[in-house]
Image: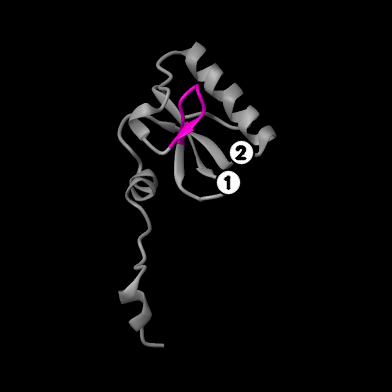
C-alpha cells in the first residue's frame, strides 16, 4: 500500500460495488455493520488488512477500499456512517431552481 497508514487500531472500509453502501472488512467478507469489522490492534493485523485491501482492489468487489482509524471516527467517516447529507424523497422534489 502506498503512503503512510493510519495509527492502530485499524479497520478496512470501502463502498459496495453494486449498492454503494459503506462496508467494512470482516475477514469473512464485507458487512455494512461496522461492529462486525475486523479490527487490527497490532502490526500483524495491520499487515493482514493491507493484504486484504490489495486483494479487494484486485477482485473489484468493492470501490475505494482504504484503512481508517478504528478509534475516534474522522468527520468523513461519521458522515459515511450516518448516510447522505442531502435530502432524498418527497422534500427533494420541492427545491426551487
Q: Looking at the picture, does residue 13 appear above or below residue 15? A: above
**Element type where label 2 sits in the image:** loop
Relative placement, left or right, of 25 versus 80 is right
Q: Earlier in the sequence, mark 2 or mark 1?
A: 1
Residue matched to label 1: 17
x%, y% of residue 81?
A: 35, 45
* Quadrant of image for the C terminus: bottom left
Identify residue for label 2: 61
- Pick the front one: 26 or 4: 26
Query: How many residues crowd around disc 1 within 10 Å: few (fewer than 14), some, or many (20 or more)?
Result: some
Q: Nearer the viewer, residue 89 or 78?
A: 89
Question: Compared with residue 87, is residue 35 higher up or lower down, i.e. above or below?
Answer: above
Position of 42 relative to 61 (above/below): above
Q: Residue at x 34, y 68 (%)?
A: 87
Query: Is residue 9 magenta-colored?
Result: no
Viewer-proximal residue among 53 and 93: 93
Give the image quarter of residue 90: bottom left
At horizontal 50% and vertical 22% (from top left) the residue drawn is 27
Place residue 41 in its image quadrant: top left
Position of the N terminus, as image quadrant, is top right
Q: Give the magenta part as a residue range.
A: 24-31
Q: Are marks 2 and 1 in contact (CB under 8 Å)?
A: yes
| Distance between the alpha carbons at the discs numbered 2 and 1 | 6 Å
Q: Residues within 10 Å of mark 2 (few under 14, many from 20)?
A: some
Whether residue 1 can be seen here: no
What percent of the width, then of the height, locates residue 89? 35, 70
* Residue in view at x 39 percent, y 22 percent: 9
Q: Position of residue 45 (x, y in %)?
A: 48, 15
Specify how the rendered protein is coloured.
one colour
Farthest residue to the bottom: give it.
97
Amino acid at each position: 500500500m502506498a503512503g503512510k497508514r493510519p495509527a492502530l487500531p485499524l479497520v478496512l472500509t470501502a463502498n459496495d460495488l453494486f449498492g454503494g453502501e459503506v462496508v467494512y472488512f470482516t475477514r469473512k467478507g464485507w458487512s455494512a455493520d461496522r461492529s462486525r469489522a475486523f479490527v487490527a490492534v497490532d502490526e500483524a493485523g495491520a499487515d493482514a488488512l493491507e493484504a486484504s485491501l490489495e486483494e479487494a482492489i484486485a477482485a473489484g468487489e468493492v470501490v475505494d477500499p482504504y484503512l481508517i482509524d478504528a478509534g475516534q471516527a474522522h468527520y468523513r467517516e461519521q458522515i459515511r456512517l450516518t448516510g447522505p447529507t442531502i435530502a432524498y424523497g418527497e422534500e427533494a422534489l420541492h427545491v426551487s431552481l
